[in-house]
């Protein structure tokens, strides 16, 4: 089986006198469309290995928000071989479970109608369930118990752990879903076996308990932290049309409504090899690794069709938006402006603009914290995603100072960049820092693997190599131009968070039906 | 016999190409043997003329240099009434300028060089680190030494640092995780413990520039420092640079009081703190042993099986994977250097499932005592600890940092060379014995932070009540402390 379309493009490394922050990555593509990035580095007897699916919450729609992330969890639930003692019995139980779930979904329709009528307050509370739902729920629990006799719990984790696997995990963003592990270097074939198996024959068993786990993750990260829900609401205000407006973890109404059938469909479309990139970094022999990759991954059939293109372009914002809220936090001012996608030619000028503003010697700290003494913390950053991006500043207001003074001071510093030329020494400082971070990001093989997954997911992994040259090429005029272009009044959303009075009640959902005080 | 044992027993050469068929099961794959010998501390250890110990390793991979200094000091040395002095000193070293440079000039200079300097003082040690481009080493090292040796402790920067600390204090009760971490420490080790005293508005306000300068003078001396140095340099040349840089330090070798070893654990029981959030945070545990206990290897294996190794461990499997009750559920085990470490099982779950999930965790703890672990569980964990052993030394920077930490805490030098054999020797009987000895349910402290009324409603499916599970039947409701005085109302 030689399905390799063999595209071995070596990144050229110029023999320059000064060392350059570059990695020599070999790129190849299998016949089924799966791309690969290989970077041997022999610091330690380990291989950091992973793959990225070019799908994230940006590819979702209302009603199934959070499915990309839930799906990430499901990829650890086993295959036809891994995670089961009897695949036939296992699949039969899953089928029976789905039948019960279908009936439970009918009951949920009834419960949603009651919610709309104001007869119940929360779909998740057991006392709001219909009697029939509870009965079905008990039936479902019996099927789960029955399934436990045939499944082997978390067997992939067990195999990796037994073989010295570390950092086994995955993450989901708006744009990508990445899976990775670090293994002793002699276990590369084991990795290929397990990963190609879960791409070829996955079984999404224990779907509904994992859906509950994901909801607990939402409760932990979003609902039980001081600013979690406020961050989510601010983000939803910032984006008008773009699917970036919903949270990666999903809306609370949607997560418990996602079905296994939707997950199956999602896998077929987005986890085909033509939508994936594999990454190997570390102690491996490239020729041997290529052989293993071909043997294990070329057997996965290409998807019947490529995933649909994400076509939504955020419309131009017409006026400033504001979000004012009280939360359990120090008073904080946040301003976001719409910027550019990650692959845009203005990405590095915007990056250097944020460097000019942020940090201990950045303009914002000097102005707001040191000189005016109205803030205790301030930072600027860019968040450039695959299809669109934001330029962000945020400041924690000093106790007793006026948040609106902080907002004005932030905007004044932006206006100063737009108005006055940037001194040469200051330009050189941010460029030097860019060079330092270009080297620092290459310090660990594992972190290089994660960056390759991440930047390939954003559409441009060679950014790791081109960054230093891009920084060199930016002029003071470029920075001023992007500040003028993007950091405009119409283009911004301002958030003001004030400390909620400790005695005031929290804005929780009403305690009883009809208690609509908020 | 398990599949895993077969794997290693059959450690023959990997089958060469041409492409063999893909086996039906990963258990039949064979792997080339991978021998690994850990680096030796003695090969990296150098003592400078002034008595300072340096662990050094050349690493030409990137044109960077890393210098990490550990200083024998700590927050436990804060004078009563000036809690926070050590931490403020640590922060202000980097932020307050030097003899020749104002804070603003120093910041500008370091940023222009793209050199990263960080300083801090924690509970039982201080740290100062420099990461710079090799081409800027001389300039960066000179500034780093000025920071360590002749800090300016500029008044306005002290005022700012204090104000930032005071504002952070106002956020102490905002995040339930912060409340849990803080109160757990108090329950475990006692409020008066030297490493556990709270900073308050009054204590931070009382710290003067002279206090900070005196604290620095008292503890910062090369004879009181250990360095870990790695990066793109020649070893001989770097040692010459360090000899020169740290020579001629004024003052004598400081006398540093030892870290106190006594602890005062709260009475076993259930401790509840009200916080209006939809998810309860639960911690169950007790103090364990110091690092010099012979039980640490069996305890480590025990904890990995119980809750320390993610999905392979019992608590995670049961509470998360089987029941879907938590995203994060597991256990952690720490061995103390100066005083006993702690075992801690923890999870977060929606309010109403807190009682049932707590019951599941307590059952797993009990099971660990009542029954021996299975051969398969033991095999997975032992192999994992042995196979991942090289990760302790995965980079030169990590290797010298580890040796420096060992020197600082005076770890038994045979620890690393014998570690894998000690793990290999652990039996199921050992695991059960240490579980019985150290995981005593009646001695445990259970802390629950969350919406207590919702929690007591329960999930409606399982008979589980928190009060009924309280060790010794002892239930205490703890109010939230005033964040600025840390007094209980």
Image: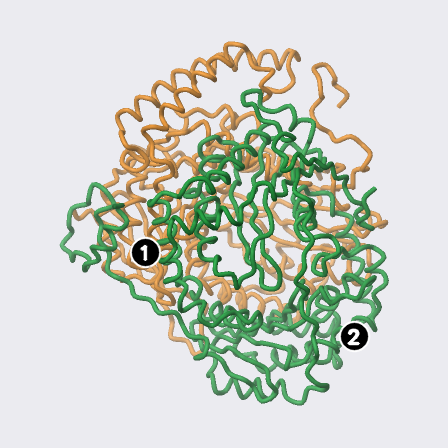
Chain colours: A orange, B green
Q: Is residue B284 left or right of residue B186?
A: left
Q: Position of residue A427 (x, y in %)?
A: 63, 68
Q: Are marks 2 and 1 on the same chain?
A: no
Disc 1 residue crowd, few under 14, some 14–19, many 20+, Cα 10 Å: some
The subunit carrying tag 1 is A
Q: Position of residue B149 (x, y in %)?
A: 70, 80
Q: Which residue is at 47% across, 72% downward?
A: B413
Quadrant of the image for the C terminus of chain B?
top right
**Quarter assignment of residue B462:** top right
- In-front residue for pair A397/B381: B381
Q: Is residue A222 left or right of residue B301?
A: right
- In-front residue for pair A316/A162: A162
- In-front residue for pair B379/A497: B379
- For mark 2, what is the residue? B213
Q: Position of residue B54 (x, y in %)?
A: 54, 79
The subunit carrying tag 2 is B
What is the number of callouts on the image? 2
Up-down relation of residue A497 to residue A435 (above or below) = above
Secondary structure category for the residue under label 1: strand
Q: Position of residue B168 (x, y in %)?
A: 75, 52
Distance (Cα) linking label 2 and label 1: 56 Å
- For mark 1, what is the residue? A27
- In-front residue for pair A84/A99: A84
**Can you name the residue that lies furthest to the left here?**
B18
């Amino acid at each position: 089986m030689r399905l390799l379309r063999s595209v071995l493009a070596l990144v050229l490394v110029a023999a320059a006198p000064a060392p350059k922050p570059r990695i020599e990555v070999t790129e190849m593509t299998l016949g089924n469309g799966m791309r690969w990035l290989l970077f041997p580095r022999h610091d330690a007897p380990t291989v950091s290995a992973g793959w990225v699916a070019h799908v994230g919450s940006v590819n979702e729609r209302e009603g199934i928000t959070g499915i990309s992330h839930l799906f990430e969890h499901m990829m650890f639930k086993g295959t036809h071989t891994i995670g089961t003692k009897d695949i036939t019995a296992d699949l039969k139980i899953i089928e029976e479970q789905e039948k019960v779930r279908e009936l439970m979904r009918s009951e949920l329709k009834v419960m949603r109608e009651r919610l709309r009528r104001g007869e119940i307050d929360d779909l998740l509370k057991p006392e709001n369930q219909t009697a029939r739902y509870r009965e079905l729920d008990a039936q479902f629990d019996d099927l789960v118990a029955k399934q436990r006799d045939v499944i082997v719990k978390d067997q992939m984790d067990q195999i990796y752990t037994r073989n010295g696997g570390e950092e086994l995990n995955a993450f989901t963003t708006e744009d990508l879903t990445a899976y990775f592990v670090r293994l002793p270097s002699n276990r590369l074939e084991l990795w290929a076996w397990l990963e190609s198996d879960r791409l070829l024959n996955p079984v999404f068993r224990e779907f509904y308990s994992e859906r509950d786990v994901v909801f607990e993750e939402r409760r932990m990260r979003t609902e039980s932290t001081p600013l979690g829900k406020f961050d989510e609401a601010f983000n939803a205000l910032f984006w008008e049309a773009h699917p970036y407006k919903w949270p990666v973890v999903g809306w609370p109404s949607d997560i418990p409504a996602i079905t296994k059938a939707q997950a199956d469909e999602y896998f077929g479309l987005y986890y085909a090899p033509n939508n994936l990139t594999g990454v190997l970094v570390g102690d491996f022999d490239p020729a041997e690794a290529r052989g293993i990759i071909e043997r294990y991954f070329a057997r996965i059939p290409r998807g019947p069709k490529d995933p649909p293109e994400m076509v939504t372009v955020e419309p131009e914002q017409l006026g400033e938006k504001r979000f004012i809220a009280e939360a359990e936090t120090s008073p904080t001012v946040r301003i976001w402006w719409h910027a550019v996608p990650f692959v845009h030619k203005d990405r590095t000028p915007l990056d250097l603009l944020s460097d000019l503003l942020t940090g201990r010697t950045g303009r914002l700290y000097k102005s707001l914290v040191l000189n005016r003494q109205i803030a205790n913390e301030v930072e600027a950053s860019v968040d450039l995603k695959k299809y669109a991006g934001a330029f962000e500043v945020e400041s924690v207001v000093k106790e007793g100072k006026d948040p609106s003074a902080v907002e004005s001071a932030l905007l004044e510093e932006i206006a100063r960049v737009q108005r006055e030329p940037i001194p040469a020494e200051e330009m050189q400082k941010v460029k030097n820092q860019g060079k330092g971070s270009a080297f620092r990001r290459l310090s660990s093989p594992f972190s290089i693997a994660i960056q390759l997954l991440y930047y390939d997911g954003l559409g441009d992994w060679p950014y790791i190599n081109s960054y230093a040259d891009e920084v060199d090429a930016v002029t003071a005029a470029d920075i001023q131009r992007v500040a003028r272009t993007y950091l405009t009044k119409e283009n911004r959303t301002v958030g003001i968070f004030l400390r909620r009075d400790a005695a005031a009640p929290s804005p929780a959902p009403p305690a009883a039906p009809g208690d609509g005080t908020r | 016999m398990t599949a895993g044992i077969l794997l290693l027993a059959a450690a023959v050469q990997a089958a060469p190409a041409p492409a063999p068929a893909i086996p039906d099961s990963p258990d039949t794959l064979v792997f080339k043997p991978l021998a690994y010998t850990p680096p030796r501390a003695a090969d990296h250890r150098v003592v400078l003329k002034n008595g300072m110990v340096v662990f050094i390793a050349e690493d030409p991979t990137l044109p960077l240099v890393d210098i990490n200094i550990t200083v024998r000091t700590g927050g436990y040395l804060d004078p009563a009434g000036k809690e926070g002095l050590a931490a403020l000193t640590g922060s202000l070293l980097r932020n307050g300028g030097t003899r020749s440079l104002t804070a603003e000039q120093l910041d500008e200079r370091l940023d222009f060089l793209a050199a990263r300097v960080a300083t801090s003082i924690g509970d039982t040690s201080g740290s100062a680190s420099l990461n710079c481009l090799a081409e800027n080493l001389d300039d960066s090292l000179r500034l780093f030494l000025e920071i360590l040796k002749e800090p300016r402790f500029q008044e306005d920067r002290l005022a700012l640092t204090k104000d930032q600390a005071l504002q952070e204090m106002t956020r102490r009760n905002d995040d339930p995780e912060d409340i849990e971490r803080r109160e757990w420490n108090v329950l475990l080790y006692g409020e008066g413990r030297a490493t556990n005293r709270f900073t308050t508005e009054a204590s931070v306000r009382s710290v003067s520039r002279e206090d900070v300068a005196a604290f620095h003078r008292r503890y910062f001396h090369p004879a009181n420092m250990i360095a870990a140095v790695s990066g793109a340099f020649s070893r001989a040349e770097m040692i010459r640079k360090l000899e020169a840089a740290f020579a001629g330090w004024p003052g004598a070798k400081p006398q540093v009081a030892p870290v106190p070893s006594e602890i005062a654990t709260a009475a076993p029981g259930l401790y509840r703190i009200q916080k209006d959030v939809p998810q309860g945070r639960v911690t169950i545990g007790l103090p364990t042993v110091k690092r010099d206990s012979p039980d640490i290897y069996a305890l480590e294996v025990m904890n990995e099986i119980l809750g320390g190794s993610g999905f392979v461990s019992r608590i995670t499997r049961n509470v998360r994977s089987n029941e879907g009750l938590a995203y994060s559920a597991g256990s952690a085990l720490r061995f103390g250097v100066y005083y006993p470490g702690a075992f801690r099982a923890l999870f977060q779950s929606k309010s109403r499932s807190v009682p049932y999930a707590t019951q599941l965790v307590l059952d797993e703890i009990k099971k660990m005592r009542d029954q021996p672990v299975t051969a398969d569980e033991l095999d997975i964990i032992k192999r994992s600890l042995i196979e991942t052993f090289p990760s302790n030394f995965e980079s030169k920077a990590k290797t010298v940092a580890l040796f420096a930490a060992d020197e600082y805490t005076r770890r038994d030098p045979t620890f690393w060379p014998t570690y894998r054999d000690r793990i290999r020797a652990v039996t199921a009987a050992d695991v059960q014995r240490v579980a019985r000895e150290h995981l005593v349910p009646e001695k445990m402290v259970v802390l629950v932070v969350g919406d207590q009324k919702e929690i007591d409603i329960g999930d409606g499916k399982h008979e589980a009540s928190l009060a009924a599970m309280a060790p010794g039947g002892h239930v205490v409701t703890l109010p939230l402390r005033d964040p600025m005085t840390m007094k209980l109302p």
